[in-house]
Image: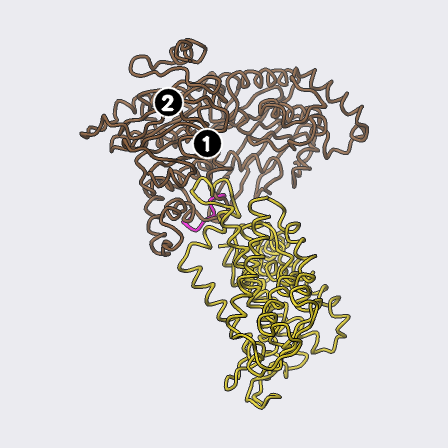
Amino acid sequence: MKEKAILEMKGIYKSFPGVKALQDVNFTLCEGEVHALMGENGAGKSTLIKVLTGVYEKDGGEIYLRGLEKAAVIRSPQDAQRLGISTVYQEITLCPNLSVAENMYIGRGTGVAQNWKKMNEAADKILQSLDIPAKASQQLSSCSIAIQQMVAIARAVDMECKVLILDEPTSSLDEQEVAKLFGLMRDLKKRGVGIIFVTHFLDQVYEICDKITVLRDGKLVGEYEIKDLPRVQLVSKMLGKELDDMSDIKSDAKKYEGKDADIDVFEAENLQSNAGIKPFDFHIKKGEVNGFTGLLGSGRSECVRAIFGADKVINGSVKKNGKTIRIKKPIDAMKNKIAYLPEDRKKDGIVGDLSVRDNIILATQVLRGPFKPFSKAEANKVADEYIKLLQIKTASADTPIKSLSGGNQQKVILARWLLSHPDYLILDEPTRGIDVGTKIEIQKLVLKLASEGMSVTFISSETDEMLRTCSRLVVMRDRKVVGELSGEDMTQNKIMSTIAGGGLENAE
Amino acid sequence: MQNKKQIFIPLAALIVLALFNLIMDPSFFKITMGLNSEGYQVLSGPLITILDSGSELAILAIGMTLVTAASGGQDISVGAAVAIAGSVMLRVLCGTEASVSELKAPVIVAFLIACVVAMLFGAFNGILVAYFRIQPMIATLILFTAGRSIAAWINNNRLPNISNQAFTYYGGFIPGIPIPTPFIIAVACMIVIALVMKFTTLGLYTQSVGINEHSSKLNGLNPAVIKLISFVILGLCVAVVALIKVSRVSSINYSVIAKDIEMDAILAVALGGNALSGGKFNMAASILGAYVIQFLTTTLYKFKVRSDALPAYKAVVVILLVVLSAPIVRKKLSELAKKLKPAKKEVA
């Protein structure tokens, strides 16, 4: 083992039926370093982490930890924890209805756990030392997602972890929260903890990490010092090809040029749902791509949910192609050819145990009604068609969707809505948690659909992505529409200033 | 894929039971044609007994599978509901008299009224589960507790008796047909549900709602309605079972009729490898599971196990089957099988 290394994984092999998930992968983590693990969806990042944390048993290779003479035996997450390897996942895996302190000590059988007072005191001490703004006695669900994640980290720190794995921790955090998390990570670095950081946000990698290990198709591409690997090269290493100029996809796309290009496909006046947003006006033209932007929690998802009838609409009127319609529930919107890809893929999007095929046909089947089921042949035909069209990586149309990678799941949901042939498509965070290659594919697809006359509303946490695809942006703050930007006004700075308060005069 | 593999569990159980019987007593499989007490040519033998007396369970397993899949819970009131439906049927057939030989109404009318009543009670359970979001087991506990009293109340606590030859056909034999009628009814139910599955989207909707309610909603489904429908279908199954049960004895005993059948029905679903937490299901596996349970019961009777000791024996076998079909055990077994295979090759 190298001198400063605390973890070394050597020649790791792992395969699943039909897939070689990891082939001869090496990975080294030194103390006090933040090490980014990068790769496209399906590159093997998650598998490598699951091998390290004992969720999967490896087929071959060895794992060495500092302080152990022989190769470590990690058969279960408990083994990993005992050896000082802790993981904080993208989705919070704590218990929201327990207190912060209980969450930190649950299932650890320490002496402290039996004494409530002592437990709270101990927890408070750790939280304080890590500068986490939470109280031990507070119920976990009353904390923001970021704080919950930090509590999970605090738990790991208290278990004296030497290797901390952060799997997509920032995907549901806003910028301030990310900054706080990074502060905590730097603090841990000083304490000598080695951190494995998995993320899709390139900016964040370059902000916090020291080293990058890139995986592709289950194989190791290489390990790099951050300063030796400029961003463009990182992306091309992840994709295994030279990247199209990312900023240029918009100028390539053709504008929709039908006669009806100026007609509003959808209009809403004073629309308000019970999800706590202020009434808003909104319209979209045929072949237009527009977007809602704003900080997390500013109400952008709630706006589109109100349009689709996903939340209860309590006020306002909507028109489709100039005709007044009523949307009380999703099926009403669907019948009016509106489609909605939800923000939370796992909770609202996929039907996990069902096959890719059933997931694709679901919405269209509901539209066709209960007495016109897709025949098997028909379902297979459309499923295969969309699997090919969107290049969905799946063993077959029969595979349960839950066993696909995140990006491919998202493509299946996209296929579901494309199959319903909408003329107004709402995409809420379609690219969250998926790799750069797929992101660009989806962006290109959006522009292509628009050029064919589909209207698209696109929401993303990444402003550049919105700037690349949208021709008009609705800006939101505190659950209120505070401005609208288009044409030359659409710049990072202008968006920021509108979010920050530049748009006050439009507020009331 | 999981769905297709599922059926191997009850199938394997059936084969093991069959082999056991074959070794112990090959006459188990003998089917004879003989005269029954009414003087018709009918089939008889242990296998026929299984097909005959497993009918009620098989029919209930159909409805229970749907309820389980859609709601992620089970209806424990089906036994009591059978008592209610049976009582309604007798009330229509006998009026207020204690014993009749001339039916007061055609059987079909009595049956249809019982169907409506049973479906209403199913809807009652369904509304509690779907709209009031009460745990299915708790919601159906209400009828489980009250059902048999309601059944007794419907007939003023009398036990009406029918002495009419034609009424025994449904639980016995139709003259000229050597196959027990209950089995014919069960097969008819299976055909109906198979057609429903083929020509409607009930299967897809039920599974979708059972797996992910939020997502189903955003795909335009109304999860509450789907759950309600599953309970109403179970209600219909209950009415059919009530007809068979009442016809078998031409009378009713409120506290005994279809006793504990809900547990066997739930067990049939579980034996079929269906997750009791809902979601994906395999109807054929559930139905096969029902016959496995009946096979087991009949086997135990055949070996002269005392009827009060029967549940204990049954429990042992059931534990074995359920443990073997548990995903964690199946996974270990398949791992073991994998390890054994290369080892064998080396030896060879």
Residue B176 x/y as whole percent = 50, 86
The answer to whether any part of residue B258 appears in the image is yes
Is B308 in front, or is B2? B308
Q: State the residue position of label 1.
A: A343
Q: Chain of mark 1?
A: A
Q: Chain of mark 2?
A: A
Question: In the picture shown, does residue A266 fall above or below B147?
Answer: above
Mark 1 falls on what kind of element?
A: loop
Which residue is at the far front? B96
Q: Quadrant of residue B260?
A: bottom right
Question: Label 2 amino acid?
Answer: Asp
Q: Is residue A400 magenta?
A: yes
Residue A237 x/y as whole percent = 41, 27
Q: Quadrant of residue B97?
A: bottom right
The chain coloured yellow carries which letter? B
- Is residue B277 shown left or right of residue A70? left
The answer to whether any part of residue B342 appears in the image is no
Q: Quadrant of the C terminus of chain B?
A: bottom right
Is A461 in front, or is B219? B219
Residue span colored magenta:
A395-402
